[in-house]
Amino acid sequence: MEHWELIKPGGLRFAWADGLFPPGTDSFLLASFPRLRPGLRVLDLGCGTGLLSLLLLQRQRELAVTGLELLPEAVALAERAAAENHLEDRLSFRQGDLRDGKALPPGQFDLAVCNPPYYPVNSGALTGEGARRTARAEADCTLEDICRAARRALRWGGRFCLVHKPERLTDLLCVLREAGLEPKRLRTVCVTAGAAPSLVLLEGRRGGKPGLDLEPPLALYTPEGAPAKELDRIYFREEALL
């Protein structure tokens, strides 16, 4: 079954389907992390049905976004979402394997983003099957595959932003540097201030010099359990609160 939802009242519509990629907080968090400006050429690796791409365009309409996705049925739904939002001139999707060096032109993007599988194939944390298992586990592509694909696609000085689990932070930093994407910005995400991080947001730069900026942690909720002001901004709820 298909589901269509608005990112915010009067905003862009996104689609997802049972058995594919349900929307999650991690996509909204990742979409808020890159520094955007008009004219950027953006690549969404493993784009699913296009939610992350649409979230970036909701923030900054003057982007040129390309999504790459392995599953044809997800690409078909993402293309319908682009048409529904009249974004065909700035949002396009390709069906292909990011491990294939010919899937994308090299060095053509200013920014790459990815909401990757979090768990190695031998992890006991895996659940589900089919597309949902692919989205959670490194069964079809590894962290190394993703970073190599981002490095190939980015121009010199281009940036790669991703969201991941804090227990894999050492892997992230090592794999990014090995792929030629120097880690430059890191922000942890926690449920409330003082709680252990539940996610990390990380930016690497192709050809960047060593030096990592640690940004203030993002707490999603107040001690009383109310959404933090920054979470309302990330979910585009600020206007509704005025």
Image: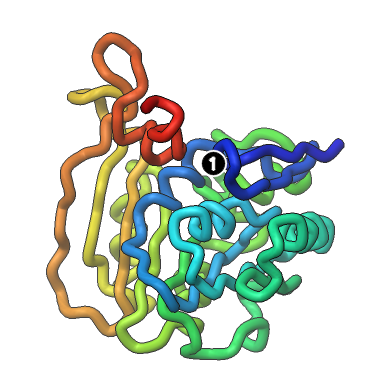
Q: Position of residue 19 (x, y in %)?
A: 79, 40
| Residue wearing tag 1 | 123
Report crowding for label 1: few under 14, some 14 to 19, many 20 or more residues within 10 A (C-alpha).
Answer: few
Q: Position of residue 69 (x, y in %)?
A: 69, 65
Q: Residue furthest top?
A: 224
Q: Can the viewer see residue 71?
A: no
Q: Residue furthest front?
A: 242
Q: Position of residue 73 (x, y in %)?
A: 83, 57
Above or below for 4 versus 94: above
143 and 194: which is toward the camera: 194
Q: Position of residue 137 (x, y in %)?
A: 60, 48
Q: How many marks?
A: 1
- Say left or right for 161 vs 142: left
Which quarter of the figure has residue 46? Answer: bottom right
- Say left or right for 145 vs 89: left
Disc 1 secondary structure class: loop
- Say left or right for 16 vs 190: right
Q: Residue furthest right?
A: 1
Q: Can the viewer see residue 103?
A: yes
85 and 93: which is toward the camera: 85
The quarter of the picture where the C terminus appears is top left
Which quarter of the figure has residue 172? Answer: bottom left
| Residue displayed at 45% across by 29% down | 240
| Residue displayed at 30% across by 30% down | 229
Kind of residue at badge 1: Ser
Above or below for 125 versus 101: above
Name the colour scheme.
rainbow
| Residue displayed at 39% across by 50% down | 32
